[in-house]
Image (cartoon, rainbow, N blue to C red):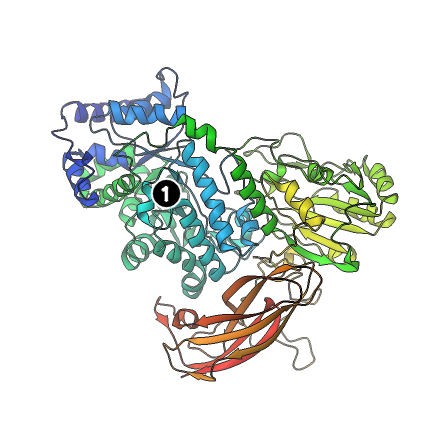
Amino acid sequence: MKNKRLLILGIISLATTTMKAQNKDYLDPKKPIEERISLLMKQMTLEEKVGQMNQYNGFWEVTGPSPKGGDAEIKYEHLRKGCVGSMLSVRGVKNVKAVQKIAVEESRLGIPLIIGFDVIHGYKTLSPIPLAEAASWDLEAIKKSAQVAADEASASGINWTFGPMMDVSRDARWGRVMEGSGEDPFLGSKIAVARVKGFQGETIADLARVNTIASCAKHFAAYGFAEAGREYNTVDISNSTLYNVVLPPFKAANEAGVRTYMNSFNILNGVPATGNSFLQRTILKGDWKFDGFIVTDWASIKEMKNHGFAKDDADASAKAVIAGADMDMESHYYVAELVKLVKAGTVKETLIDDAVRRILRVKFELGLFDNPYKYCDEVREQQVIGSKANNDAVLDMAKKSIVLLKNEKSILPLKKSGQKIALIGALAADKTSPLGSWRIASDDGTAVSVLEGMQAYKDNTLVYEKGAAVTIGKTTFIDELVFNTSDKSGFEAAKNAAKNADVVVMVLGEHGFQSGEARSRTNLDLPGVQQELLEEVYKVNSNIVLVLNNGRPLALPWASEHVPAIVEAWQLGTQSGTAVAQVLYGDYNPSGKLPMSFPRNVGQCPIYYNNYNTGRPVNAEKNVFWSHYTDVEKTPLYPFGYGLSYTSFEYKNLKVNQSEFNKEETVKVTVEVTNTGNYDGKEVVQLYLHDLVASIARPVLELKGFELTSLKKGETKTITFNLTDKELGFFNNDGTYLVEAGTFKIRVGGSSDSGLETQFELK
């Protein structure tokens, strides 16, 4: 291995020291970008081109002396020779400036690096996890959240995020559901556009601004359909599911101008996504005319050998680049193999040229050639990161993400004075777990805890008891968690506090590192002894508000039956406790709706609202032979689109402007919504469609429109939806979009399982 590394260094050194740049016309900002790319590429050696396709992780104290020996020295020399196109996990102005200086001032052509990082739901100041943000159904707030993340990341030297994740997933066992927008392709598509524009700006030209960053649509494609919800597992889906469920958010992102895609770890039709030409060349670069670049997921070129799809390093490299993967993240294969493969005739240099042109295009769009250090302003770094404005924005996002699942006996909102409240649960005082799994740029212990949030309301008597720890031992991003399954020593103190309280607030759920990448579960209950703690406290005081901290839908049949109030608070980021307290006390009326169905138990998974009818959907014959379970209802515990408010809403007068339509005509749907309760509030008005008969069976319901509307108590508004061919059609198994004549049912309401219904005919 050592000799191989030395050989690579020797080849690169020889190629780059024997040739000098003739001119730097490509630095002229007056020239069009495509011309500048062409001028630069004419001067690049094959080795330098391949170097642009090479991405390395951070690897040494970059502001210190140059490294000696090992991988660090090789990577350092690659930087100096212009054979690194991007780096990830290098952050902070001083560090980014140091590595950029090597690439720009020591390499022959001075091509700047693009600096990538996982800015998933914030940089230092964290918004709620993406699944929680999706529960807001507030596209402007979601876009603002991405803008805050881009503002802070760019101030720290970063110009590219590996997000947003737009994998549709129907299986709560898969830990990465926390990183996406849930189970629905329509909602997922809208959120994908909001996040892309939040990171990048409204147009590609906005990438040149100092406070925007390039975004990355991931994971392409079908990663969210991993079998059994197990991370990195096999995917085997139909073309109908691929075209109608998986691809729409990715296509919407492309239309919004997303500049990069990341391929996924899974196989599709037996072919790893990294080596899948159908996905990358036929669909993305061909049909969709995407002109940015594709980066592999971490070492996914190397993993094609484990899949049994590539026999060795060279074979894996050839298959990846031929299939359309432009940049190699941390396999180290492209830089080692591609020059040899081109010279041997195995890989055409035109494929290399195409990949490099795409990478350079994004660098020019970011303005890196005009000012390689544009993201390296230490004054801006100090002013932007952790600012009050950013904290205010993530607090607003956190409040909008909370979903009220149950509120019997009007236990909520809490009174602001005269109540004795017992606050119970280790997560109630936790200042780290609410930050979630992807908090790698933030600092532990920086979240506002629920305890701190409730202590701000000083006119009640608040007593806190831990009850029981959730985990035992260290909790890190890379280690398996160990859960407390035996220590109940705090139960009695918790019960005593509950006995003397008017209301008990229990904060229970998942640790922040229990969801996310590689955090699959086969049980979706409250981990450890938390369920037992809940039941023991209930015995002494049933007046419980259960506040859930979690990164995925949980199975909560006992709580749903017994506990009078349940608040889905997810993992809400930096301002978590403040947001929860303001909702509990009624200073903010919850308006969130579930972006994923909550199962009754894990045996229902995957469970989703937009399912298909079977041949025996109901118990028509009054016997056992119909599609159901014998031990539990087949419906979810809490369905997609569900969420309560402290007020109530009434729907009436659902109308379609005519009974029959021709194709390409707009179907106008109106409904009146009235706030019939005692509080001002917001409602997500949802429109669902069912195409009754089609050449390919359609789901029983499909979300095709929604509007978040504010209503003062007693106020009525008329909500209008316009349906076009874009909403009325579907993709067949060849990927052709069809709009077919027939009968369409419409449902409009506040959830996928309720609402007013009507229908119309399409000729």
Residue 81, x across and y down, in percent: 24, 25
Left or right relative to 294: residue 512: right
Q: Is residue 527 left or right of residue 119?
A: right
Q: Residue 230: in sight, yes or no?
A: no
3 above or below 665? above
Can residue 555 be seen here? The reply is yes
Residue 570 in the image: state x and y as whole percent: 62, 47
240 relative to 550, above or below: below
SS category of the residue bearing label 1: loop
Q: Badge 1, how many Cα within 10 Å: few under 14, some, many 20+?
A: many
Q: Residue furthest left?
A: 22
- Give me the residue at 62% from left, 57% from top: 591
Q: Amino acid at mark 1?
A: Ala
Describe residue 6's horizontal placement relative to residue 586 as left or right.
left
Give the quarter of the figure containing the C terminus.
bottom left
Task: Give residue 630's quadrant in the image.
Answer: bottom right
Q: Nearer the viewer, residue 49 or 41?
A: 41
State the quadrant of the N terminus.
Answer: top left
Left-right relation of 138 to 504: left
Q: Choose top left, top right, bottom left or bottom right for residue 28.
A: top left
Residue at 42% across, 77% down: 695
**Is 62 located above or below residue 616 in the figure?**
above
Q: Can you give x and y, in whole percent of width and height, for residue 574 in the image?
A: 58, 38
Q: Which residue is mark 1?
A: 214
Which residue is painted at 14% across and 26% down in the image?
20
In the rendered image, residue 710, in percent from the top left (x then y), is placed at 58, 60
